[in-house]
Image (cartoon, grey):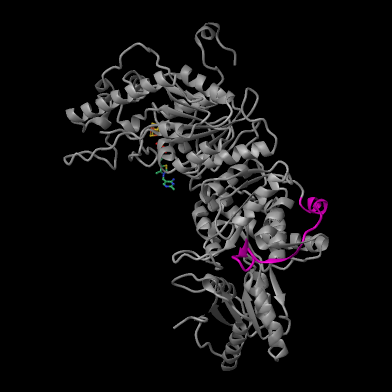
Amino acid sequence: MELPADVKKRLTLPFEEHFYAGHTACQGCGASLGLRYVLKAYGGKAIFTIPACCSTIIAGPWPYTALNAPLFHTAFETTGAVISGIEAALKAKGYKVKGEDGIMVVGWAGDGGTADIGLQALSGFLERGHDALYIMYDNEAYMNTGIQRSSSTPYGAWTTNTPGGKRHFIEQRPKKKVIDIVIAHKPAYAATASIAYPEDFMRKLKKAQTIRGPSFIQLFAPCPTGWRSPTDKSIELARLAVQTAYFPLFEYENGKYKINMPSPNKEPKPLEEYLKLQGRFKYMTKEDMEILQEWVLKEWEELKKKAELFG
Amino acid sequence: MPKKVVSGNYAAAYAAKHARVEVVAAYPITPQTSIIEKIAEFIANGEVENLQYVPVESEHSAMAACIGASATGARAFTATSAQGLALMHEMLHWAAGARLPIVMVDVNRAMAPPWSVWDDQTDSLSQRDTGWLQFYAENNQEVYDGVLMAFKIAEHEKVNLPVMVVESAFILSHTYDVVDMPEQEEIDEFLPPRKPLYTLTDFENPFSVGALGTPADYYEFRYKIAKAMEEAKKVIKEVGKEYGERFGRDYSQMIELYKTDDAEIVFMGMGSLMGTVKEAVDMLRSEGYKVGAAKVRWFRPFPKEELYELAKNVEGIAVLDRNFSFGQEGILFNESKGVLYNTDAKPIMKNYIVGLGGRDLTVNDVKTIAKNMREIIQKGKLDREIEWYHLKR
Ligand SMILES: Cc1ncc(C[n+]2csc(CCOP(=O)(O)OP(=O)(O)O)c2C)c(N)n1
Ligand code: SF4
């Protein structure tokens, strides 16, 4: 398809679509937007592995697929292992893996399938040094089974197994820092990204394509269904998560940290702005919010220090 | 034909090498470990090219990595045992469901607790409903031949299902014996490179494997596997015959019959214990017993037709099970009784549970069983249907 002349000027993302209409995501789904960007980045020259998660459904039931790329649906906890096997097979058969003209091997898994049940396979994948990319799309709960907590669910969040109410039975533990666990493996490349900053995400995807060894991207992907947020607020929420430093954008490469915030000199916005747009935080008390705010800023300081020391 | 004195495990490793496997993903467990060690050695010594070895972090991942590799078109191999096989269970369904011709050697080992590393068939038989074909080897030669045939059968266009080659812990895995191995060129002729049903490298025509199957379609997917299992019987016999013609060892029978032509009593079982049974048959014959042995080589697909033919002409079948399904009976006994129910062959059948967790089954034990069977046949009535043979009371 030819691009209208005026569009060309503004567009920085590849125009070609490889994620088709007819997928079955909810309205305003951040994950599906993320998947669309990944497909754009690799122009259909990627082999996808998707475990049990919302994306299994989003991709479409047999005999349909919304992805213009080969896709293997696998068991919940196996993403790291299956992409290892695919990469090994490509090498055994003499295919070029990665690079501009090579094949990208991409694992696309939710936070549950990554931070919880799939952590072991992820660790194995990273530690063995396979030439593949693992993307964890982080919607902060098990959405596919109906919004249960994962270890990536933040403090204070309502989910169906931390339902709030009189006994204050909301999530009591801080969000697991999966990216830190990943970095502890000394991968070739690790980064956080957000669907609100597609250019940044695209750049990171391109980076993963050129670098040897395992890459990992944790992509922040709001879920209006699970977050009890308006369907037209997903991008705004993803942006606020970055602006409040709740989910800062950074990269790790060769032992070095690099923060890539859109407005590097701005102080983080108050977290409340982010929290109040979402029904899932409605059981939080004032103190809860303060606890979470304090935690976020402490983590942010820690990250800045890392970037300073290992920049 | 080159001969090597090797353990059952080395026989498996050589067979994988000679089959020119492209990806091996495996996790160590006693008594399987020396299979994957040997394969690593082949790589280290430069004896194999284009073999990717993925030292995964668990058996679950071993099978998952084999699945990824096989879906990408590679010939994939792994090996495990007992707890490792149980950990793989979920992915065994996945391999069969995705129609991937992976070959795995399972070293039959008893399930814990109590911890045990010795022979017992319950680990592999617990996987019987996963859609894997299962071949039980009696000796090291059969381990070797079994692996080579397994690839050819698994990859056959009418089958496209994974195959498990089963050998017993220590009795085969760590015991050395002479094994005939054909020349590599002869093997290459028998087993050409894999032609996959599909591969994930097809970017011109991208598709998804394993997507959500709604009630409108799931059923048909299962039916196709059921059909492939039936087709596999023919393929097994053809490949077994071809193997015999090329290499001199015929595997065209799914049940190997030993002196059963005029037998009144037949001992039926699987795996290494059948070596002992054949020995006992020879001795019993010299003592005037009309006995024979029926070694079930393929447990999946189950050789119903061959069993029926055998059962028509015998008076009693002693089924020796080195396994047990709690709450019911020995698994081979259970399966074979089921096969005969709707036929007019009705020999007396008795189930002997033997050698669980690696306890020996000796020639004398088989003789005692023969005497017991003869009494039963003379009386025309079972003393009991299931006997836990040599149980300490
Ligand atoms: C072994 C196993 N246990 C449980 C499930 C059920 N299950 C399917 S998807 C899912 C949650 C997925 O959550 P996540 O990875 O966060 O992705 P999301 O659904 O949020 O996109 C669960 C628990 C399963 N498929 N397999
Ligand atoms: S539940 Fe959430 S993650 Fe899942 S499809 Fe809907 S919006 Fe997307």
- Residue B337 point in image, percent of width and height: 56, 75
Image x and y of residue B19, in percent: 73, 51
Quarter occupied by the N terminus of chain B: bottom right
In the picture as drawn, the residue positioned furthest to the left comes out as A166
**Corner quadrant of residue A171:** top left
> Is residue B234 among the parts visible in the rendering?
no
Q: Nearer the viewer, residue B178 or B70?
A: B178
Give the side of residue A268 with respect to residue B100, left or right.
Answer: left
The C terminus of chain B, quarter of image: bottom left
A31 or A103, which lies in front? A103
Residue B230 coordinates in the image, percent (x, y): 65, 60
Write the start and end of the magenta stretch as one range: B166-191
Give the image location of residue A298, x and y in percent.
Answer: 29, 25
Residue at 70% across, 91% down? B287
Q: Going by the picture, which residue comes out furthest to the front?
A: A309
- Residue in the picture at 66% in, 70% down: B305
Residue located 35% across and 39% down the image: A150
Q: Is residue A89 above or below residue B84?
A: above
- The verdict on residue B354 being magenta is no
The image quadrant that residue A65 belongs to is top right
Q: Quadrant of ligand 1?
A: top left
The reply to whether the magenta stretch includes residue B182 is yes
Image vertical order of residue B262 relative to residue A258, above or below: below
